[in-house]
Image (spheres, helix red, strand yellow):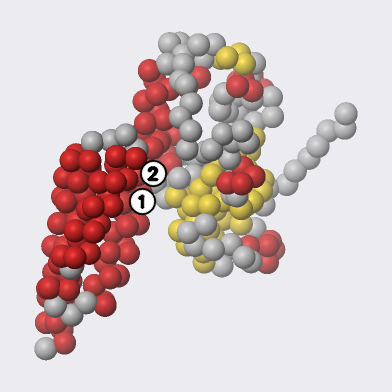
Amino acid sequence: MDKITFSPIGYVKSQFTDHAPSEDIRAHSAQLVINPELFDGLMGLQVGADILVLCHFNKVTQGDVALQLHPRDNPDNPLRGVFATRSQYRPNPIAATVARIEGIEENIISVTALDALNETPILDIKPYVPHFDAESKHPASDIRAVSSLDEARHLIDLIDTEVIRLFGKRAKYVHQVVQFKNNPTEIRAQKRYDEVMRRRREMASAAGLNPDVIEQMYKLLVENFIKEEMEILRQRQGNEA
């Protein structure tokens, strides 16, 4: 079979220059610097959308490739063939990572959750479409069996990273809500508050969680947001006075 040659469409700009745990790399923002002559190809990409980024593991040498290995370089994890792992030490060192667009400025795309090092060559960008890219036989939310404690902890860390990111996004919408309120009574919005708590308890029960625990967690979160809203309102009224 003929050899295939690709030319990078850009490179990654990240604070990580050497190997680090994936969860640490994904927790920090990065930029996709696209070749200027390909700028027109970015039309249609939107902030908040998820994209599939294909990269070349340019620091992997042929001597690094292992057809069988312990996932995450941990001997406690059962030996697997490389095609059953996410290892970078592959015959064709291609990375596939899903990231979320946080900003687009000319030919530079700012993203979060990207698992790639600084100056990693980018081969392609595609929109991430769950209908096509998620598991074909099971919903993406299904819990799969793990083969080790480390794997379970790694997946928990990934979920926690996403949960915290979503809470951060929720906070930004909450802060926007203040512009539509004019007094402290509207911020407290007791009727809305009670309805939110009732629905969260129902969601918790449906998910097999303790509703009392989830309600207490949300009360802490919401009360903190209410304090922040009160302060924003106070500052706004002070500026208008």
Q: Position of residue 82 (x, y in %)?
A: 62, 20
Tell me, yes or no, whether the two marked residues, 2 and 1, touch with CB atoms within 8 Å: yes
Who's the residue at 27% across and 64% down the image? 174
Q: At 57% from the left edge and 14% from the top edge, which residue is drawn? A: 80
Residue 119 appears in the figure: no
Amino acid type assigned to the residue bearing label 2 in the image: Glu
Looking at the image, which residue is at 69% across and 24% down? Answer: 91
- The residue where tag 2 is placed is 162
User: Going by the image, does 33 lie left or right of 229?
Assistant: right
Mark 1 residue type: Leu
Q: Which residue is mark 1?
A: 166
- Give coordinates of residue 66: x percent, y percent: 62, 17
Query: Toward the viewer: 145 or 80?
Result: 145
Residue 202 appears in the rendering = yes
User: Measured along the vertical axis of the image, is residue 119 above or below residue 58?
Assistant: below
- Horizontally, is 11 left or right of 144 in the view? right
| Residue under the point 44% across and 34% down | 22
